[in-house]
Image: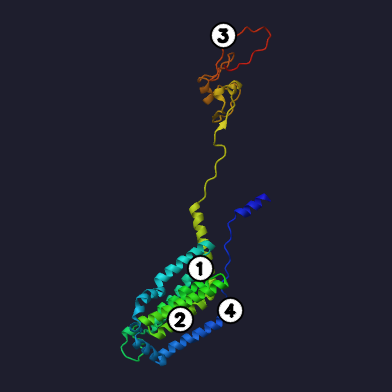
Amino acid sequence: MRTDIFARLDREPEPPKIEAPRMSRHRIALFGGTLAFYLAIVFAVLITSWLVALDWKVMLFRPYQQWPELHAFLDYYVVLGQRGPTAVMVACWLGWRSWRQHTLRPLLVLGTSLLLLNVTVGAVKLGLGRLGPHYATQIGSAEMFAGGDIFPSGHTANAVVTWGILAYLATTPRARRYLSAVSATVSLGVGLTTVYIGTHWLSDVVLGWAAGLLILLALPWFEPLIARTEAWIFAMRERWRERRGGARPAPVAGTGPQPVLVPQSMANDASAAETVMTPAEPALPAGHPTTGVRARAHGGLPARPGTLPPTPTGVRRPPHTERGPRAAGSPARPMTGG
């Protein structure tokens, strides 16, 4: 019972389970409505409708000349829509969350959303080829299929996706509401800033908002793929750890030094208080001359019959003058160390 308790205490804490947003009916309806709006904007620009005329009116108004005092601030604010700086900032925050929660889902969701952003928005940009306001050639023209790459606005779509990921990955409804408001404010400001500077038409910004929202709404469909990718990465990590650790050889029993019995006189001597450790020798038959370590301990000569055994090293025998007479029939005195 105590072993089970300590095993449960030593076990690492499990990461909190984060439920992925499901594709509910409300989300599907919102996705369908946003997609219809996206296609309507593209169609309106292709036929050079009133939306294109509005683009030209805003462009000829030249907002950067109407409010020049805002130009210095908005030049820095528009960086919040650039893919490189925003991706690094958000990736640092999500990386810290992944480390705390022991999961790769935040980083994988960010990577998936940025990949979808590059594929979808980039394909439409290159396919439609619209020129920007500074490169327009004919007033009132849609400037489509002219080799440009500004429709839809990549700054606006990136701001929607990058900052919207924080709301998508929020763990509580309250945090999701606050982060949704922050991401909407940032993406709205970034889009209008590009119109103020004159790098995008107004329709580019509107289509960029729709493109970014479509990516956020479509992310739940990619959650199973994200989960499988995370499981595969963890499995590869465990295999790498096993290969790096390797198999260690087990210790061989009986290879260490073994104790050897010594005479009682040596055991009583202060200099032989600790146990003498020498390699064990095989047992010899009776009458066989002593060899090896024992022979060397006795001077290298075998014991002869009829003689006293040699005195062990470190034990002194009393001289003949100090030996007392022994009565006939009296028992022999034991030898003790001096």
- Closer to the chain start, of discs 1 and 3, is 1
Of 69 and 234, the residue lying toward us: 69
Residue that label 3 marks: 320
Can you say whether 36 is above or below 3 in the image? below
The amino acid at mark 1 is: Pro
Density class for disc 2 (Cα within 10 Å; few <14, some 14-19, many ≥20) is many
Residue that label 4 marks: 24
Residue 14 shows up from this direction: yes
- Closer to the chain start, of discs 2 and 1, is 1
The amino acid at mark 2 is: Trp
**Which mark is on residue 209?**
2
The amino acid at mark 3 is: His
Cα separation between marks 1 and 3: 94 Å
**Which mark is on residue 106?**
1
Q: Are marks 3 and 4 in contact (CB under 8 Å)?
A: no
Q: Are marks 1 and 3 in contact (CB under 8 Å)?
A: no
Cα separation between marks 3 and 2: 116 Å
- Give the residue drawn at x 52%, y 25%: 293
Give how far across and how far down residue 91 sits, in percent.
45, 67
Residue 199 shows up from this direction: no
Cα separation between marks 2 and 4: 22 Å
Can you say whether 265 is above or below 107 in the image? above
Density class for disc 1 (Cα within 10 Å; few <14, some 14-19, many ≥20) is many
Nearest-to-viewer mark from 3 and 4: 4
**Which mark is on residue 145?**
none
